[in-house]
Image: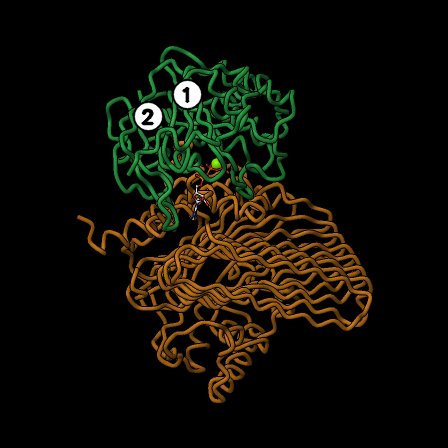
């Protein structure tokens, strides 16, 4: 589904991604772990098309199509969803209005039916139950005054509404209490299906006990230095990243 | 291919011209012009005298070069002595049925059908075409409750006592340069009187259309809400695209008696000029309300998207104890538009309260100034004001300025002021686009959010209209 080849990218004048290679098959969950500042969010932003992130080289194919040539909204319409590490506030815009605008834009681009507020509300309420979000929260302005956990659950709710093919989840588990963690993980698991894939960025093995990954990738200094099964997460949690980097450093 | 012409066309869709024979006053501004206009309208003596006094005063202002210069707007000098001060369709309809088909279709194109079958439900409209009111809908329905709503000219004929009593009582002709000019030459406008204790069952609305090529438009609106009454009133405006500037100098006077409430909303969409700043309306308007009695309430809401230059300060004299004055404004400038707008809240009565919410949006080379005065008079014990002025910049060629003045002569007053300047942030745009929205839709969503507090004040139908207008106006300015 997703093919990343030799991707290099920079932000704010710093080269952050130094040649990423990653192949994600439909039906799988890939975890990415890596130290702070190693480029995990940069990778997610590059994949989603954030204009501040500049691709310097390499290519990315999504279902065989050149992803990097598409503007962000087209990537979203093609089925790419980014669960933001730090979602922004949008003053004066109600959360449910925001979500319906995106939902309808995506559906319209597929010549599918757009929903009026009442129809949309009905579906939204059902999905909100899954992530245990109080519907009143959705009448508030986008992310304004949401707690850390509410923000994360709300991102997962948006994912559930849009049913994307590829969900890129940038630390959906950070800052969550045990209950929220379970709720978020269940939300992710509900979406797993043979035709969908998940790229899950995390620092902790905890969430991987719920959302069991097919592959764990270790990202250091803008490169994937190691990939393995779910045991790799436990190993990293136990030993840290020390020693991971050198193992595969090319002897330049 | 998009030529600059078609671009301007697509941005301002009200720019068409109605092909109709019009009668105009002879070019120039002399005592004869004033007499000509007054005679044309068959006015009683008191009106002519008042106009002539205003004219004299205006001429002394012109001689002494007292055209206002303090606003943050720039334009070449206006040749007042060489203007055309009156233009009206030649046919003078006796009733709605007789209104020229061209004019009816003009209003229909503007989205304000006047014919009975097509009218907006719940809204009574007075349609002003150049210098005269051509039609008023729902007159009889309103008449049953004693509400007077129609053209100013009719009111002068039918209710001279009311006109005489209130004309100039809030904005005297000595008030300022343009108020003096308006008093001398104004041709028509809307008049409205709500009797004691009546809650007006319809939205009242006036739609101003400038059509003639060279004339200025000088209308005057007078609205009186007697004790314990309520009315919500809305005005809209548009004009054809022309490459010369046209002057629009209107006066609006509102009087709310004890326990009465007036909600006055404006959606101003005069032709703003083209993308190089050629043409467009000079919108120099004096609007003031008197909250005359105890518990009187006045609320101004304005959405200003049009005009080359806007110079406008809807104000409230808070005379009564516990009276309330509100000002909600969205002003958008793009291209080379300039806006200097704000309000003046003069607290005279005890416990009087005022609230100012101003949202300025600048795009392109637009310049947007908020200018406001909150004045607390010695007897206004415990007066309160809250002011919030927010500016949103789109691009880096535009400007926003905030000029809030405060004069406090009673130490028990409580004033709060907040001001923010922001840009539509790349993070917000990206968030919206990541969810599938186009960048235009994302921009308009964010900008609408910025304007929400103001749009919420508009009657529902017009809130939708305002949202759409803002979207159309910003097309091509963002992205
Ligand atoms: N806008 C920017 N301007 C300059 N440098 C940036 C910018 N955004 C990110 N960086 C830098 O790029 C590097 C990678 O950042 P990134 O956010 O991708 O890290 P991360 O792996 O997601 O870290 P964390 O685990 O802390 O979330 C960091 O050194 C960061 O400072
Ligand atoms: Mg990160």
Q: Which residue is located at x 54 percent, y 25 percent? A: A204
Q: Is residue B434 above or below residue B133?
A: above
Q: Is residue B124 left or right of residue B257?
A: left
Q: Colour in which chain A is shown?
A: green
Q: Residue A235's x, y, as percent?
A: 50, 21
| Of the pair A245 and B35, the residue shown nearer to us | A245
Dots 2, 1 in contact, CB < 8 A: yes
The chain carrying label 2 is A
Q: Is residue B197 above or below residue A183?
A: below
Q: Which residue is located at x 57 percent, y 20 percent? A: A206
The chain carrying label 1 is A
Q: Is residue B399 above or below residue A195?
A: below
Q: Which chain is orange?
A: B
Q: Is residue B237 left or right of residue B174?
A: left
In the image, is the residue at mark 2 within 8 Å of ligand 1 by its beta carbon? Answer: no
For label 2, the residue is: A22
- Give the alpha-carbon distance from disc 2 to disc 1, as whole Å: 10 Å
At numbered mark 2, what does the secondary structure look like: helix, strand or loop?
A: strand
For label 1, the residue is: A30
Q: Residues within 10 Å of mark 2 (few under 14, many from 20)?
A: some
Task: Report whether residue B114 is seen.
Answer: no
Name the quarter showing ligand 1. Answer: top left
At numbered mark 1, what does the secondary structure look like: helix, strand or loop?
A: strand
């Amino acid at each position: 589904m997703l093919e990343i080849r030799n991707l290099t990218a920079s932000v704010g004048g710093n080269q952050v991604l130094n040649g990423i290679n990653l192949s994600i098959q439909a039906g799988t969950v890939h975890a990415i772990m890596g130290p702070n500042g190693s480029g995990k969010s940069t990778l997610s932003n590059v994949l989603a098309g954030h204009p501040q992130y500049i691709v310097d080289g390499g290519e990315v194919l999504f279902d065989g199509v050149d992803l990097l040539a598409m503007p962000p909204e087209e990537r979203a319409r093609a089925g790419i969803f980014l669960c933001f590490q730090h979602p922004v506030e949008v003053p004066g815009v109600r959360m449910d209005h925001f979500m319906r605008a995106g939902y309808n834009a995506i559906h319209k681009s597929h010549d599918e039916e757009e929903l009026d507020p009442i129809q949309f509300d009905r579906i939204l309420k059902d999905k909100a139950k899954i992530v245990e979000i109080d519907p009143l929260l959705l009448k508030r302005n986008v992310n304004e005054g949401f707690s850390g956990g509410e923000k994360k659950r709300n991102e997962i709710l948006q994912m559930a509404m849009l049913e994307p093919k590829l969900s890129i989840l940038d630390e959906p588990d950070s800052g969550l209490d045990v209950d929220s963690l379970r709720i978020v993980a269940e939300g992710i698991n509900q979406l797993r299906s043979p035709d969908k894939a998940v790229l899950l960025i995390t620092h902790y093995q905890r969430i991987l006990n719920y959302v069991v990954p097919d592959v764990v990738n270790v990202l250091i200094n803008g490169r994937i230095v190691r990939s393995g099964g779910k045991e790799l997460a436990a190993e990293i949690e136990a030993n840290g990243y020390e020693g991971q980097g050198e193992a595969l450093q090319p002897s330049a | 291919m998009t030529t600059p012409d078609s671009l301007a066309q697509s941005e301002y869709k009200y720019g068409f011209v109605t092909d109709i024979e019009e009668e105009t006053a002879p070019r120039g501004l002399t005592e004869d012009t004033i007499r000509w206009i007054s005679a044309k309208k068959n006015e009683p003596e008191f009106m002519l005298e008042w106009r002539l006094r205003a004219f004299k005063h205006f001429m002394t202002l012109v001689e002494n070069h007292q055209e206002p210069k303090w606003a943050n707007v720039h334009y070449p000098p206006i040749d007042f002595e060489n203007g055309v001060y009156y233009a009206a369709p030649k046919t003078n309809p006796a009733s709605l049925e007789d209104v020229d088909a061209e004019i009816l279709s003009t209003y229909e194109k503007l989205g304000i059908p006047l014919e009975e079958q097509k009218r907006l439900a719940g809204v009574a409209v007075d349609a002003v075409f150049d210098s005269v009111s051509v039609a008023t809908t729902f007159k009889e329905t309103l008449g049953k409750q004693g509400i007077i709503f129609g053209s100013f000219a009719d009111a002068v004929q039918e209710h001279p006592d009311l006109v005489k009593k209130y004309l100039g009582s809030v904005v005297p002709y000595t008030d300022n340069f343009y108020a003096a000019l308006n008093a001398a030459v104004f041709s028509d406008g809307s008049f409205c009187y709500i009797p004691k204790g009546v809650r007006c069952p319809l939205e009242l609305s006036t739609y101003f259309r400038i059509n003639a090529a060279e004339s200025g438009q000088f209308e005057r609106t007078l609205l009186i809400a007697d004790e314990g009454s309520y009315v919500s009133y809305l005005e809209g405006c548009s004009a054809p695209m022309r490459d010369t500037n046209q002057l629009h100098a209107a006066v609006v006077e509102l009087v709310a008696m004890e326990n009465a409430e007036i909600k006055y909303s404006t959606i101003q969409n005069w032709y703003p000029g083209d993308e190089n700043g050629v043409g467009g309306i000079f919108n120099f308007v004096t609007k003031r309300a008197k909250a005359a009695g105890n518990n009187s309430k006045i609320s101004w809401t304005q959405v200003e998207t049009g005009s080359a230059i806007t110079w406008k300060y809807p104000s409230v004299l808070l005379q009564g104890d516990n009276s309330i004055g509100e000002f909600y404004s969205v002003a958008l400038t793009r291209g080379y538009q300039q806006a200097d707008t704000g309000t003046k809240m003069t607290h005279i009565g005890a416990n009087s309260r005022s609230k100012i919410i101003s949202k300025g949006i600048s795009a392109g080379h637009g310049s947007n100034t908020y200018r406001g005065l909150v004045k607390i008079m010695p007897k206004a014990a415990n007066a309160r004001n809250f002011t919030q002025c927010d500016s949103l910049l789109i691009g880096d060629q535009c400007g926003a300025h905030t000029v809030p003045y405060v004069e406090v002569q009673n130490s028990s007053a409580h004033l709060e002021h907040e001001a923010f300047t922001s840009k539509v942030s790349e993070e917000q745009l990206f968030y919206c686009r990541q969810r599938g929205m186009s960048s235009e839709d994302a921009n308009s969503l964010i900008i609408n959010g910025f304007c929400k507090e103001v749009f919420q004040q508009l009657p529902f139908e017009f809130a939708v209209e305002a949202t759409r207008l803002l979207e159309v106006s910003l097309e091509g300015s963002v992205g």
